[in-house]
Image: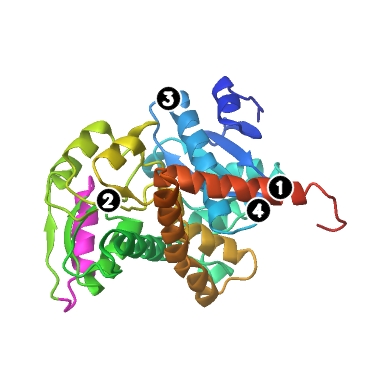
Amino acid sequence: MTDRISVSAFGHGHEQVVFCQDADSGLKAIIAIYSTALGPALGGTRFYPYASEQDALADVLNLSQGMAYKAALAGLDLGGGKAVIIGDPKTIKTEALLRAYGRMVQSLNGRYYTACDVGTFSPDMDIIAKESAYVTGRTVEHGGAGDSSVLTAFGVFQGMRAAATHVWGASSLEGKTVGVAGVGKVGKHLVGHLIEDGANLVVTDVDAAAVTALQAFHSNGTGATIKVVDNTDALVRERLDVYAPCALGGALSDEVVDILSAKIVCGAANNQLAHEGIEKRLEERGITYAPDYCVNSGGLIQVADELEGFSFDRAKVRAAKIYDTTLDVLERAKAEGLPPSIAADRIAEQRMRDVGRLRSMWLPNR
């Protein structure tokens, strides 16, 4: 393992970036710790076939910073971190590779706790935990919380209800048309909440099997109709009230914002803003953006609860507060004349500063 800080990592303000390699298992990974001001960094491990190491580095830096802000805004005493494993999990994921990765996590001595993300699942966390004590998001059989996508989707739905209250004066999505891009782990459950609330659905996914699974999952007597379109470009051209990006980042590009008819953007994907300044373009077009790391923190709340001895009911009560947090962010943004993303950043940064200063006073056994 080498500890090598990129120039771009300094620009992001990260505490530590660790490049990990194990030749025998084929492991190539990067662990990024953005901040431990509020506590140990917690964030999932993304297993993805990046085109280059630089692409992987850019992703892990952005994701780890987002995790720090997400934890702060959710009121958790946790910092922000993230890890990426470079490669196609369908072809190179093995027990040996996951255990080698677990040893890398263990070497950080609790500064970073890992969990599931794109390409990794609770059974993978069980394998990683054979080599590391700093793992959450484990299977129920091993005392864990299981699939964190359940509360991630629940939290996004609460954020969407808050945005609806802010825009239309009522929290229900009944009769509204919601476009969901990405109907895998989180999107599938989000669609379920929207069906129950009486929304109309338009969906797409790059994986046709995910769409087929979604249709089968929601075919049991709901009477709901789900319109399927070929791709995200077709989806954003539909007449929508709400756009919910639930796949990978960068969903809100200039091109998308220019053609989007939705009045609300609220989805589970991380890092939805394609570049700085796009939030102003959303504002100019009268589109309310519910910041991604505000509304998608349900999964983080779920795996964080596991560190206390998991209670689904307790975690769900905490995730329900995403409604209040989102509404607070949107109302503060309106009152101060700020884009919601900036208002959310300021709230998170204030908590990191205030609690970080408090924790500068050392206490024994803490």
Would you say the residues marked 1 and 2 are in contact, meaning their CB atoms lie under 8 Å apart? no
Position in image of residue 224 (x %, y %)? 14, 71
Mark toward the start of the polypeptide (3 vs 1):
3
Mark toward the start of the polypeptide (1 vs 2):
2
Q: Determine if the magenta segment contains residue 321.
A: no
Q: Can the viewer see residue 342 in this picture?
A: yes
Question: Residue 239 vs residue 325: left or right?
Answer: left
- Identify the disc placed on residue 52: 3
Mark toward the start of the polypeptide (1 vs 4):
4
Is the residue 251 above or below the residue 365 in the image? above
Is the residue 85 above or below the residue 72 in the image? above
The residue nearer to you, when weighing 189 against 209, is: 189
Q: Residues within 10 Å of mark 4 (few under 14, many from 20)?
A: many
Question: Residue 97 vs residue 238: left or right?
Answer: right
Would you say the residues marked 3 and 2 are in contact, meaning their CB atoms lie under 8 Å apart? no
Q: Amino acid at mark 1?
A: Gly
Mark toward the start of the polypeptide (4 vs 3):
3
Q: Determine if the magenta segment contains residue 207.
A: yes
Q: Residues within 10 Å of mark 3 (few under 14, many from 20)?
A: few
Name the residue that disc number 4 marks.
Answer: 134
The quadrant where residue 157 appears: bottom left
Start and end of the magenta stretch? 205-222
| The furthest residue to the bottom | 221
Q: Amino acid at mark 3?
A: Ser
Query: What is the C-alpha distance between the residues marked 1 and 4?
Result: 22 Å
Is the residue 20 above or below the residue 146 in the image? above
Name the residue that disc number 2 marks.
Answer: 182
Name the residue that disc number 1 marks.
Answer: 356
